[in-house]
Image: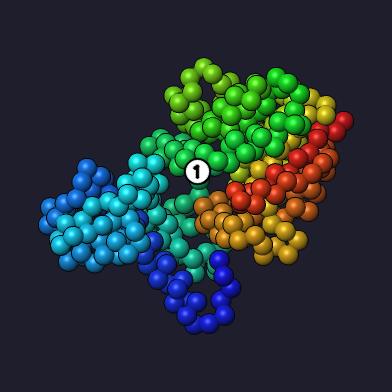
Amino acid sequence: MKSITHITDLDTMRRTSSVYAVVCAWAHRGLFEALSEGPRALRELPGDERALDVAARILGHLGLLVGHGDRWGLSVTGKRLFDEGALSLGSGLRAFRDLAGLDRVLAEGGPARGDDGSSRASEGGVREQDPDEARQFMDMLYRRSADSAPETVRWMTPHLAPSAHVLDVGGGHGRYAEHLLQAGFRATVLDRPVCIALARARYGDRLGYLEADFLVDPLDGPYDAALLSNIVHGLGPDEIVTLLRNLHRSMAPGALLVIKDMLLDESRVQPEAGVVFALTMLLFTRKGNSYDRSQLETYLTEAGFHREAVVDVTDQRFSLMLARRTG
């Protein structure tokens, strides 16, 4: 994301936000799905024809639709993205409503509130009382981890003994654990019951499972390693230390701890992915944030771990902090 140096930069940001809203609204109305079997006339689609025409031309400009006369269909790219599930963006409309309340959040603090005034905070991105929403969220994380899961395991492998038992903390969709299994390790997914049920439905008995609250419950063990993929950014500093101490009790001496996240550098305004993602944490968690490397190293030391290395996987926009259990 380029720095703002001119009014035209702000205009570009406004247009980008507007067209993303169109993509989300089209998805929310089921219109990508309606076109997935082939081109259709706008009058055949549910909605106002004038409004659909305006939106379709914007989506055509983005390369997602192709139009001829009053008929529109998915482009080759649009069809591929639809088939991959990448255009399941109906929840994006809810995000725009949450962002509209950012002025209140800046004045009073997060999380965002719903239309009825209730908190929009979730636990690890899911709400136990809404299994369907949890499934959609886990499916999204599963799709987005297609490259990051094998890459994370590739960097972990040289630091693990053969057949090491790895605890995938908050492993939800199970993709990281599956890649650990393929690499010859034992893998146990730790998460809340609603997420464990989804992972079990996808992978069956190939993985181990542990239903627990990682801040409160015993975590069994001892484990040879633990992976925290995109976990610490959803927690406050005190919760991170609590989690790390709980892990320390369940890990073998010298066990490997891997924190995968969008770690900030010393300036705390880079990289872009981590800086901007902190806003999501402000809106949807009670204490979450993006953390810099020195902060995490302090928390690790306090909980009984020694930082060994940091690997910046720049093309995937994440970093791996590797540490060992001491004592």
Q: At 69% across and 57% down in the image, what residue appears? A: 264
Q: How crowded is mark 1: few (under 14 residues within 10 Å), some or many (20 or more)?
A: few
Quarter residue 206 falls in: top right
Helix, strand or loop for disc 1: helix
Residue pictured at 69% horizontal, 22% vertical: 165
Residue 277 to residue 213: above or below: below
Q: How is the image coloured?
A: rainbow
Q: In this view, does 185 lie above or below 123?
A: above
Q: Name the residue under label 1.
A: 144
Q: Residue furthest top?
A: 205
- Residue 98 against residue 33 in the figure, above or below: below
Q: Quadrant of residue 290?
A: bottom right
Question: Dividing the picture into quarters, in which one does residue 24 lie?
Answer: bottom left
Q: In which quarter of the image is the N terminus?
A: bottom right
The outermost residue toward the right is 327
Q: In this view, does 72 lie to the left or right of 187?
A: left
On the image, the x and y values in percent for residue 115 come to: 37, 57
Residue 177 appears in the figure: no
**Residue drawn at (44%, 59%), measured in percent from left and top?**
98
Question: Which quadrant would the C terminus be assigned to in this image?
Answer: top right
The percent coordinates of residue 218 (x first, y second) are 67, 26
User: Seen in the image, is 278 located left or right of residue 42?
Assistant: right
171 or 19, nearer to the observer: 19
Q: Which amino acid does label 1 sit on?
A: Arg
